[in-house]
Amino acid sequence: MTKPIHGSVCLNHPDTAAVARCATCSKPICGECVKVFDGVTYCSKLCYENALRTGMLTEKVYSQKATGDRRRSIMAAIKFLILIAVLAGAFLFYRSHKREIDRKANELKYKTERKLQEGKNVIDKNLIKDSKYKKDRERMVNE
Ligand SMILES: [Zn+2]
Ligand SMILES: [Zn+2]
């Protein structure tokens, strides 16, 4: 606050060159009128308080927004991690139990095929016994 602001005079002292502008209302002010709060020049304590209030308000809004964003991204990250964990778990389980699972699957397949075959055998056997039905079926097939 040493260099005069070109062409500006203090609003309170019209014959004195202004050396600074109020950070809040931009009023030109001379060295005598300058009030410094927190290293920033203001024309009055009121302007400092206004600046403080505005700054706090802005900060609050920003921090709230940042908190919301952070919470959202953390939730997304957690969901993603859970998904990865589940997939990895399933994969690891399959890999470590691959033989068992494959054997079970084959067993199931074999059992199912056998059951089907058994069913077919039973039907065929009954068909042989019940010649009328067998004939009907043969006729149906031949027609
Ligand atoms: Zn001011
Ligand atoms: Zn002044």
Image (cartoon, rainbow, N blue to C red):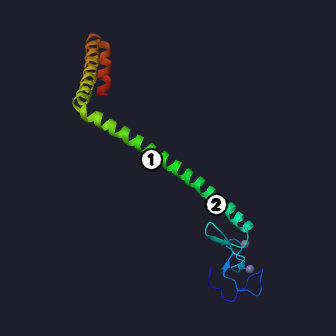
Decide: is 109 above or below 87: above
Nearer the observer: mark 2 or 1; the answer is: 2
Is the Cβ of the residue at disc 2 closer than 8 Å to that at disc 1?
no
Residue at 24 percent of width and 24 percent of height: 107
Give whichever of 57, 42 is nearer the camera: 42
Task: Identify the residue under disc 1.
Answer: 77
Q: Quadrant of the N terminus?
A: bottom right
Gap in angstroms between the C-alphas marked 2 and 1? 28 Å
Residue 34 x/y as whole percent: 69, 75
Which amino acid is tagged 2? Answer: Thr
Looking at this view, is 72 or 41 the one in front?
Answer: 41
Task: Report if the beta carbon of the residue with label 1 is closer than 8 angstroms to ligand 1.
Answer: no
Crowding near the residue tagged with mark 2, few <14, some 14–19, many ≥20 C-alpha atoms within 10 Å: few
Figure quarter occupied by ligand 1: bottom right
Instruction: Residue 128: name its quadrant.
Output: top left
Residue 58: which numbered mark, if any? Answer: 2
Vertical side of 118 occupied by 44: above or below: below
Q: Secondary structure at mark 1?
A: helix
In the rendered image, the residue lying farthest to the top is: 129
- In the image, residue 62 lies at what x, y percent? 59, 58
Mark 2 or mark 1: name the one nearer the start of the chain: 2
Label 1 neighbourhood size at 10 Å, few (<14), some (14-19), many (20+)? few
In x, y percent, where is residue 99?
21, 30
